[in-house]
Image: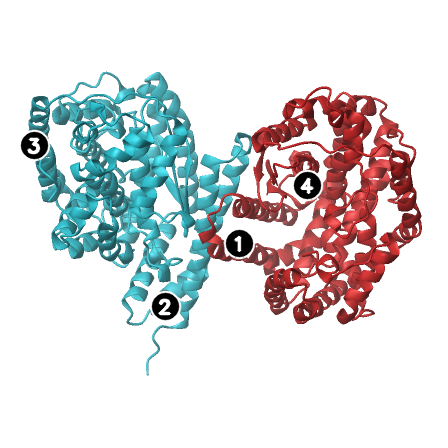
Chain colours: A cyan, B red
């Protein structure tokens, strides 16, 4: 009889469980850095984190690890096989780069991030150009080295760091279609919107304790397990923490509760994915989230697909009124007005402030530019022009300065090329998954209207969360929805919600 | 020309800097576990901590480390030489024990701790005996193995884990003297106390926010740097955290603010020591605190020596009144009454609730017993009898049950033998250091009367904190005070404060 798996594979599981503990430690330390750390500890914490990262890299790239990976046999079990494949993928990414290139990247991005903060403030692209040039040159070396190791193109190698299995050839046709349809769709949505009664603003102030209580209530309503996570405050909201300890943050402003509430809902979508990963594989690579696109699909599922729907707004309206002691008869707090507020469309210059209709346009611009930067078809000195042309072509807006143009995001200054497309792919995936879920289980939609997320979460658990990294993003979407990831569901969703003003289907 | 130090030494500094980062990570994760972690993450966090501890042990005991330690030359610099000596000491402790003994200890103490919680609750020494027997047997093996590696006696090897350089031959004569003098001294103090007006209780409730504000105010008054530390709440107060990020905790009860306030002052003493360690050596063994005795001397310096003095109480009384909006004319809030409350002496059964006069008696009992348990002169079945006899001999109290007797502390169930004496040594050291400081710098005492701790802290920085582990506890005390650690200063302090009712000198 053949063994189910060999001892090399078993050793690898032990090594990767240790790496998982290091990741947990880093997750809590990073959360702590943003939420509780006194500011005088910042430099030392930076050193601590770098040393722990270095330790992780050292364990991952030790000669023993390469030997074990070469000789490991995971047997016939699908999950073990997928686990071994993920281990090899992670190892390839880690070993593809020579140590001095990793070091050079760390130093260059640290310098570049600091320079970017000033350059954005001062609207000084020219001053920032040398820093970004250094980061881009190094990123292109990274892309080349990883491309050789993975056997893919340089841009695909960058994509693979954030979204395993996603390739430019998958994205191009989808984005081409969006590029073709989006400008007219936006125009039609704006025309329709102009024909509706204009929305009435909500009168604050909205005290922070009430906002926080509301956020917690909604998190629990969605199914977030408060015994295995937290809600706190940080300058830049995020979802982090560790296995069994998923921590999300938000920030509050007294004048408007909607940004914090939608932020909590967004991060709760990320958190529910993390809390729904398969317990059995929690400390192994195959048990981790399947990449940025699926992750973003889960946050947008909650924030955009469900919680801006008329059905959800009808249910949540009385809760919002009660949270802030508003009058039952105040017109601004009626469900229709709240829904108009939550689905207001307005082409704007700032990506992170955008609605779900115009958002993909921001990504299309960045995607084309970063491909061209990596291939060398676009010189960095021409970045502002290309950026501004792109925004004008898709959104009809003139970018008045680089601060509100190509300098607005931290991603490129941080060396994150190949990351932007995941945001738009996540939006498309959320629409496609939601439509399938509603079709496959007729109880989901009416339950949302009663504030009951259990049927939807059950479907997501089965079709997305519990699959973890046992399949790639493209495969997860395909087997969950019966079709490859595409723009159909997203475009239908936008038309139905913003043109037909019809309930989700 | 000879090199100042060799490359082996330089490599060791890099390895130990990495270990220091791991310690920082463990410190923050342990703080988080007690303060912020959701309870559903407890098991996973336990695994994470064990894996990080394992990683630290692995780095420390790697063959390369032994080679480097064997060939390292720190040159002539006193600090580097002391650093290398500390590295060798830490390495010897880590490598003295075979892996299966470490593992057996971890498992036995985990079982024993759980069994102890129930045994204490149920007053069931017989049921706990098998667990404690296992822990003691393993601890004796540990003591023998470390004794062989360090070239000291088994009990000294245990002492050395908590208090490097402290030996039983140093402690015995000091404790013998305390044993001889303490019973009569306690009786005299009680007689004197009976002749004074009885103290009036303070009327609460004392709201938690005011208690917390008071604690923060006092911490800052003492010199705690809030940009490099925090104050929070936990079930069991402690001082932990990391380098540059010293975190202390307390717990509040509305009926009485004094326990939380004195707890904060005690932990602030520990914290000021950590914040005062030399920056240059912060990530090296020589830059760490010199052991439990010196640490405890610093917490007791603040809590007992200074903050229960008449001079400090005179200064703090108006602040306390204002904190809780008490009437200026309320007799209970006058300095004399507050001082009587803060220096009330009452022989009791519970060590952690004891005043500074009776406290050492609790340690004397435990010290004699644990020496006899380690040497084999006392069998565990005879522990309750020996314990109760000791308490009766020193404090004149009959121990009514083991819950309030030998089962009250977690130390032995946790396998911490050789730890108890540091508490009493710390009390003696704090008295000896304080008396010397007051003698050497005549500005210290009057400054305390004005709530100004800067002169005292300056003296402690120079004579204790900044020395870190560049010398052993006995040497630090000797060079700071001109004499070996002894009981003179403590006994003088007690007589002066409790019999003469005179200001500290």
Q: Are marks 4 and 2 in contact (CB under 8 Å)?
A: no
Q: Residue furthest bottom?
A: A1
Q: Are marks 1 and 3 on the same chain?
A: no
Labels 4 and 2 in the same subunit: no
Q: Nearer the viewer, residue B242 or A13?
A: B242
Residue A426 image position (x, y, % from top left): 22, 42
x then y, percent, for residue B4: 70, 41
How far, Cα to Cα, is label 4 from label 1? Answer: 24 Å
Q: Secondary structure at mark 1?
A: helix
Q: Residues within 10 Å of mark 4 (few under 14, many from 20)?
A: many
**Same chain shared by disc 4 and disc 3:** no
For the residue pair B361 and B92, the one nearer the viewer reads as B361
Q: Chain under label 3?
A: A
Residue B325 image offset from top left, x and y in percent? 64, 23
Q: Which residue is mark 4?
A: B287
Residue B290 shows in this picture: yes
């Amino acid at each position: 009889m053949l063994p189910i798996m060999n001892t090399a594979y078993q050793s690898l599981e032990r090594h990767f469980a240790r790496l998982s503990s290091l990741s947990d430690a880093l997750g809590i330390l990073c959360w702590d850095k943003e939420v509780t750390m006194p500011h005088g500890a910042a430099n030392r914490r930076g050193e601590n984190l770098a040393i722990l990262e270095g330790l992780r890299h050292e364990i991952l790239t030790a000669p023993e690890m390469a030997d074990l990976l070469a000789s490991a046999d995971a047997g016939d079990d699908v999950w073990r096989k997928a686990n071994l494949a993920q281990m090899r993928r992670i190892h390839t990414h880690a070993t593809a780069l020579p140590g001095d290139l990793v070091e050079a990247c760390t130093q260059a991005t640290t310098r570049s991030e600091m320079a970017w903060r000033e350059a954005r403030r001062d609207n000084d692209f020219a001053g920032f150009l040398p820093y970004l040039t250094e980061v881009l040159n190094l990123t292109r070396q990274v892309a080349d080295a990883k491309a050789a190791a993975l056997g893919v193109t340089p841009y695909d190698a960058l994509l693979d760091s954030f979204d395993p299995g996603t390739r430019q050839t998958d994205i191009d046709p989808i984005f081409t279609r969006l590029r073709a349809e989006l400008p007219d769709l936006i125009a039609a949505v704006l025309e329709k919107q102009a024909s509706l009664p204009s929305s009435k603003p909500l009168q604050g102030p909205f005290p922070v304790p009430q906002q926080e209580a509301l956020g917690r209530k909604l998190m629990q309503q969605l199914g977030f397990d408060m015994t295995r996570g937290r809600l706190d405050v940080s300058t830049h909201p995020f979802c982090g923490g560790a296995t069994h300890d998923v921590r999300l943050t938000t920030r509050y402003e007294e004048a408007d509760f909607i940004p914090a509430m939608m932020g909590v809902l967004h991060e709760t979508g990320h958190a529910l994915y993390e809390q729904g990963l398969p317990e059995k594989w929690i400390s192994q690579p195959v048990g981790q989230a399947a990449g940025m696109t699926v992750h973003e699909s889960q946050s947008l599922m909650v924030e955009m697909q469900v919680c801006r729907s008329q059905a959800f707004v009808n249910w949540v309206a009385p809760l919002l009124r009660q949270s802030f002691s508003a009058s039952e008869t105040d017109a601004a707090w009626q469900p229709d007005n709240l829904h108009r507020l939550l689905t207001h469309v307005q082409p704007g210059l700032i990506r992170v402030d955008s609605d779900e209709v115009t958002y993909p346009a921001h990504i299309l611009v960045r995607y084309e530019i970063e491909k061209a930067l990596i291939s060398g078809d676009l010189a960095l000195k021409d970045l502002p022009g290309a950026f501004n042309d792109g925004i004008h072509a898709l959104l009809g807006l003139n970018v008045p300065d680089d601060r509100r143009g190509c300098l607005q995001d931290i991603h490129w200054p941080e060396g994150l090329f190949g990351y932007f497309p995941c945001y738009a792919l996540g939006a498309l995936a959320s629409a496609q998954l939601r439509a399938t879920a509603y079709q496959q289980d007729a109880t989901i939609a009416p339950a949302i209207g009663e504030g009951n997320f259990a049927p939807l979460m059950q479907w997501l658990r089965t079709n997305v969360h519990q699959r973890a990294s046992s399949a790639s993003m493209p495969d997860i979407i395909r087997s969950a929805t019966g079709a490859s990831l595409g723009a159909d569901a997203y475009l239908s969703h936008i038309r139905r919600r913003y043109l037909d003003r019809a309930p989700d289907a």
